[in-house]
Amino acid sequence: MAVEEKHISSAVIRRLPRYYRYLGELLDSGVERISSNELSERMKVTASQIRQDLNNFGGFGQQGYGYNVEYLHKEISKILGIDTSHNMIIVGAGNLGQAIAGYADFEKRGFIVKGIFDINPELTGHSIRGINVKMFYEMEDFVKNNDIEIAALTIPKESAVEVANILVKAGIKAIWNFAHTDLNLPKDIIVENVHLSESLMRLSYNIASRNKDKK
Amino acid sequence: MAVEEKHISSAVIRRLPRYYRYLGELLDSGVERISSNELSERMKVTASQIRQDLNNFGGFGQQGYGYNVEYLHKEISKILGIDTSHNMIIVGAGNLGQAIAGYADFEKRGFIVKGIFDINPELTGHSIRGINVKMFYEMEDFVKNNDIEIAALTIPKESAVEVANILVKAGIKAIWNFAHTDLNLPKDIIVENVHLSESLMRLSYNIASRNKDKK
DNA sequence: TAGATTGTTAATCGATTAACAATC
DNA sequence: TAGATTGTTAATCGATTAACAATC
């Protein structure tokens, strides 16, 4: 039976990709080692938080030395699961779907776009970065037969729940949801929401509250 | 001098747009009033949290009755600053820029796209939802002369910091940053980050940790 | 009035920061 | 060895939940 893993809070998980990004930049600029203190200054977080966060997963540093940049970068990639590749499809071939399909950096991190689907027959055959847009009715079988783990949902909210249910039936593991709605899927399905309208409202809130302060 | 406003935590602000969305749906389906308890069931949060969150901004409910949906929806729109319109530009006319420009719901919430800019001369004159793409060198004056509050930055990370500085010089209030980098702007400039690659890594983390549990 | 449900205070829980002994 | 810096425990701070008096 599975050993009970220590639960990692979502606050920690939210910070991990940012550590990964900064370490990648350090690596590119040839920095070999870094202390939690120096990293904390660059990232504008506390050194204590960095050490606490990392020690959720293991002791990656060395007393008196700090952290080896290349090693820590690699270890975080393992934690994040981006040391292996993930097959992905995109559902919705509009601008947003195309933007995601066209973003080469995702592929670099191991997210491989295997297919793009759309209901609009006009888009079929249309090619995005060498990937032909397929018809929506082909999606279910495609997911079943091509070891697809992730589906990016870039479709209007009206059809999102229905499409998500089809994907779950086809055995999808995770949904990257750009539709402006909650999906309420079985709890073993991973859902990562990107609600752009909510992001824009938070920005708007901050403008409004700044204006009020000034008065 | 400004009265010291009570500080609202970012956890609360993060939830506000979601309340707004659920209330909008209730409004559309003709529901007149709702208790914190019923809303908590729909949204899968505690009723206590809803009441605490709202009471940061005022007492919008009524004992024995609950909350009037239309009234509360309206009040939250004021809090979020989406009861007035905001002029906006988009910098970067790629797929992501086009996706944002083309999303009608933003306009419905009062975010008006006044201009789209790109360095690529080939895109100039190209029209997106009736808005002509303008040349990058026109941007600074355009921001100064057209009361632009918000700039959506949908450009590669390499040029993001430089472009952001130009926008700040031109008097921008807020930047909606889609570039995969931190901007480090003066603290009176509002920055809302949408780091899609980080979102995808969090999703990947959850797949990886679920797989580990299963073993 | 009685019942329902808020607004708000108090209790709990969790996350962040500080401190320092361990150790490279 | 002495100095530096981690890993980790303890202290603090903040956010969430529970409870209930106020009140519609």
Image (cartoon, coloured by chain):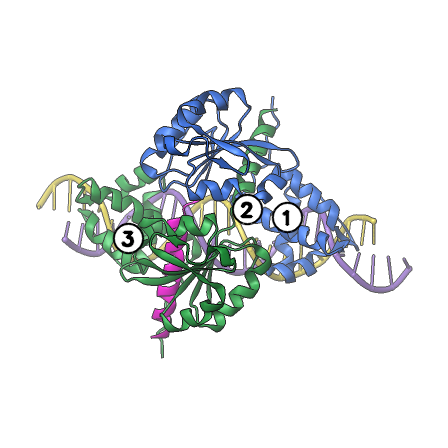
Chain colours: A blue, B green, C yellow, D purple
Residue occupying the point 28% across, 41% down: B39
Q: Which residue is mark 3?
A: B108
Identified by mark 2, the residue type is Glu
The first of marks 3 and 2 along the sequence is 3
Q: Quadrant of the C terminus of chain B?
A: top right
Q: Is residue B32 above or below residue B210?
A: below
Measured as percent of width and height from the top left, residue C8 is found at 30, 57
| CB under 8 Å between discs 1 and 2 | no
Q: Is residue B165 above or below residue A103?
A: below
Q: Amino acid at mark 1?
A: Tyr
Disc 2: host chain: B
Against A62, residue B110 (above or below) is: below
Query: Circle 1: is it few (<14), some (14-19), or many (20+) Cα within 10 Å?
Result: many
- Which amino acid type is marked by label 3? Lys
Q: CA distance from mark 1 to mark 2?
A: 9 Å
- Chain that bears disc 1: A
Q: For mark 2, give the secondary structure.
A: helix
- Residue that numbered label 2 is attached to: B198
Which residues lie in the magenta part?
A: A193-215
| Mark number, residue A20 | 1
* Residue B19 appearing in the image: yes
Q: Residue at x 32, y 44 (%)?
A: B47
Q: Give a yes or no on whether discs 3 and 1 share a subunit.
A: no
The secondary element bearing badge 1 is classed as helix
- Viewed as shown, does residue B16 lie left or right of B201? left
